[in-house]
Amino acid sequence: MSGSTFIVLALIILAVAVVKIGIIMVQQGYEYTVERFGEYHTTLRPGLHFILPFFYRVGAKINMKEQVLDVPSQEVITKDNAMVRVDGVVFFQVLDPVKAAYEITNLEVALLNLVTTNLRTVMGSMEMDELLSQRDHINGRLLGVVDDATGPWGVKITRVEIKDISPPRDLVDAMARQMKAEREKRAQILEAEGFKQAEILKAEGEKQSLILSAEGEKEAAFRAAEARERSAEAEAKATEMLSSAVAAGDVQALNYFIGTKYVEALKYIGGAKNQKIIMMPLEATSLIGSIAGIGEIAKEAFSNRNVETVPHPDVILEKASQPKVSRKV
């Protein structure tokens, strides 16, 4: 092999090596910084690129995807001097690869220390009850503080989350007793409220019952008064008719009226509870005369209507006198 051939072959091999070294493949989700003689020159986006070796080189390979940084557990003293252990996570994304590469050294360590210190600051200014009940508020405050601090680094803090807050065992026991007492208190209050409502409803029911009873008694009294009024009107009408009949010379009407009253009086006397023995007859002749008068009136009433003749007064007296005598009441 001649010397010229060897030189050509060497140049070809050198050119292939230079081309191979100068070809840069940037994957999706990453961006590379390019330096020329140690100074930042440009940024390579995802895809195939070629740089001139020996003059240019890749400076930093920056992950542009959203990343998760785990915050280790640490002890925090709250405003009311309670010791708690807290851990969390941070979600961040690089927006400016140049600042992330040249404005801060070891970005993840810096973020971790920044979140840790601000976590203690924020949680140390709050009381224990606020820590347990206001996690969203803590997350929001941490996000605002850390995001402002990482702005010059070309980093965007998307989320800061508190994973766990672990109070001491004795404090947990005290909180459990407090919660139990609070629940018992609420149960007693609800029970008292239920008893109160039941008593109110019971009183309302009794009130309505009394009102309805009074209304019923009022209505009954009104009906009874109306009945007495009608009875008195009927009595007055009967007396008026009797007076008119007597004035017209009809003595039988008077006998009928007296006979009916006499029979009613005998019924009341026989049915009285304080009477044991009734002796008969009691002016039986008067009763017979009255019944005879009733028969005469009945004859006169039905004579013009072709109705069956009224029985003789002696027959009426015989039928009426059979069941009237009672030896014991």
Image (cartoon, rainbow, N blue to C red):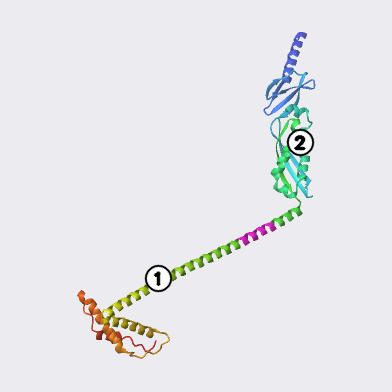
Q: Position of residue 40 (x, y in %)?
A: 77, 22
In the rendered image of this protein, does residue 249 appear above or below residue 62? below
Q: Quadrant of residue 65?
A: top right
**Identity of the residue drawn at 40% across and 70% down:** 226
Mark identifier at residue 28: none
Q: Position of residue 117 (x, y in %)?
A: 78, 40
Instruction: Mark yes or no: residue 87 visible.
Output: yes
Mark 1 residue crowding within 10 angstroms, few (<14) / some (14–19) / many (20+)? few
Dot 2 and dot 1 residues touching (CB under 8 Å): no
* Relative horizontal placement of residue 133, taking residue 276 as reference (left or right): right
Q: Residue pushed farthest left?
A: 306
For the residue labelled by badge 2, is the local secondary structure a helix, a strand or a loop? helix
Main SS of the magenta segment?
helix
Work out whether mark 2 precedes mark 1 in sequence or the reverse, and give the earlier one: 2
Q: Quadrant of the C terminus?
A: bottom left
Which residue is nearer to you in this view: 151 or 249?
249
Q: Quadrant of the N terminus?
A: top right
**Identity of the residue drawn at 32% across and 76% down:** 240
Residue that badge 2 annotates: 111
Q: Amino acid at mark 1?
A: Glu
Residue that badge 1 annotates: 226
Disc 2 from disc 1: Cα separation: 100 Å
**Identity of the residue drawn at 60% across and 62% down:** 196
Q: Amino acid at mark 2?
A: Leu
Mark 2 residue crowding within 10 angstroms, few (<14) / some (14–19) / many (20+)? some
For the residue labelled by badge 1, is the local secondary structure a helix, a strand or a loop? helix
What residue span does the magenta drawing correspond to?
A: 180-193
* Relative horizontal placement of residue 294, taking residue 32 as reference (left or right): left
* Relative horizontal placement of residue 259, taking residue 65 as reference (left or right): left
Confirm whether the magenta stretch covers residue 190: yes
Confirm whether the magenta stretch covers residue 21: no
